[in-house]
Image: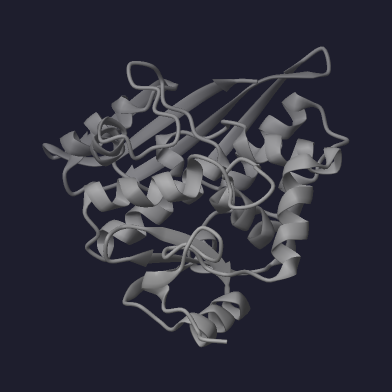
Amino acid sequence: MKKLSPEKLTDNNVLAHKIAKGLWFQVEYQAYLQDKDWKSKRLNLKTKNFYISDTNEKYRVINHWGSSDLLLDDNDGGWRSFSLLDIAWIKTISALRELGLSIKKTKEVKKHLFEGKSDFVGLPNRIFEFYVMQMLLEGKDGYLIVYEDGSSDMATREDLAEHFRRFGMRNHIAISLKSILKNISVLDEELNFKDLTDKEKTVLMAVLSRDFDSIKIKMKNGDYELFEKSRKEKEPSRPFDKLREVMSDGSYQNIEILRKGGKVVSLVHKTKHKV
């Protein structure tokens, strides 16, 4: 049988920007979206327990990406909060931008990864979410493949190798989810703590985020009430820019500035979060 080139692939076969995947994907993807055992894990992945300070990006960058419709759920005009899925996507945007992908093409990537329907059994398109979960729980590395026109898909190394063997290879950018997620302080237990209450989950996620020098947790009548994160910036090179960035975080804050000899030597900011 004559082998089709990527340019000639059709909806009845494999779309030009789609990567042929093994049977494992169809089985696991359908189970991920439909089986009730996955429901709590999906909810935990999308629970917004994080803030701009957890993204490692400056406020102005996040604000620009939000106004450019790159974020998954832009709450412009309100306090920005983020889920693990949001942070994984933000880190992916950062990687794409560092590799020179334009805002316009990055929006195309977002469309292919989050919008519309999947290519089989009419399920929603949750391809990025699925591979993030596979990486976090199974350690299965997924690769984001982006072609020159911004079209994209995701696959494992094995599925990529088989696809390229069958259909040939086009110029593309490849980003490993493992490399994207390695700096996110997340453990398997974070997505599998079904025996914890919502408040216990929130506090645990806060502790595991590691974006603080100290954390205080306040309880009332044996129940979690709030936690306070404290972080110290020693001798900030541009203290007033840093101050503006800190103040842009929507959390309730207490900011302390220590000056010595007319110079700002430290900036301590404490953020309080109700549980």
Residue 186 image offset from top left, x and y in percent: 63, 52
Q: Residue furthest front?
A: 1
Q: Residue furthest right?
A: 195
| Horizontal side of residue 145 vs 178, given as left or right | left
Of the pair 243 and 2, the residue shown nearer to us: 2
Point 56% across, 31% down: residue = 48
Point 57% across, 44% down: residue = 125
Q: Quadrant of the N terminus?
A: bottom right
| Horizontal side of residue 266 vs 125, given as left or right | left
Residue 20 image offset from top left, x and y in percent: 58, 70
Residue 245 image offset from top left, x and y in percent: 27, 34
Question: Which quadrant of the figure has residue 53?
Answer: top left
Point 76% across, 57% down: residue = 28
Q: From what the image shows, is residue 270 above or below residue 267?
A: above
Colour basis = one colour
Of the pair 141 and 266, the residue shown nearer to us: 141
Of the pair 165 and 58, the residue shown nearer to us: 165
User: Taking the image as drawn, is residue 23 in sight?
Assistant: yes
Residue 6 image offset from top left, x and y in percent: 41, 74
Point 46% across, 33% down: residue = 51
| Horizontal side of residue 215 vs 262, given as left or right | right
Q: From what the image shows, is residue 114 above or below residue 272?
A: below
Q: Quadrant of the C terminus?
A: top right
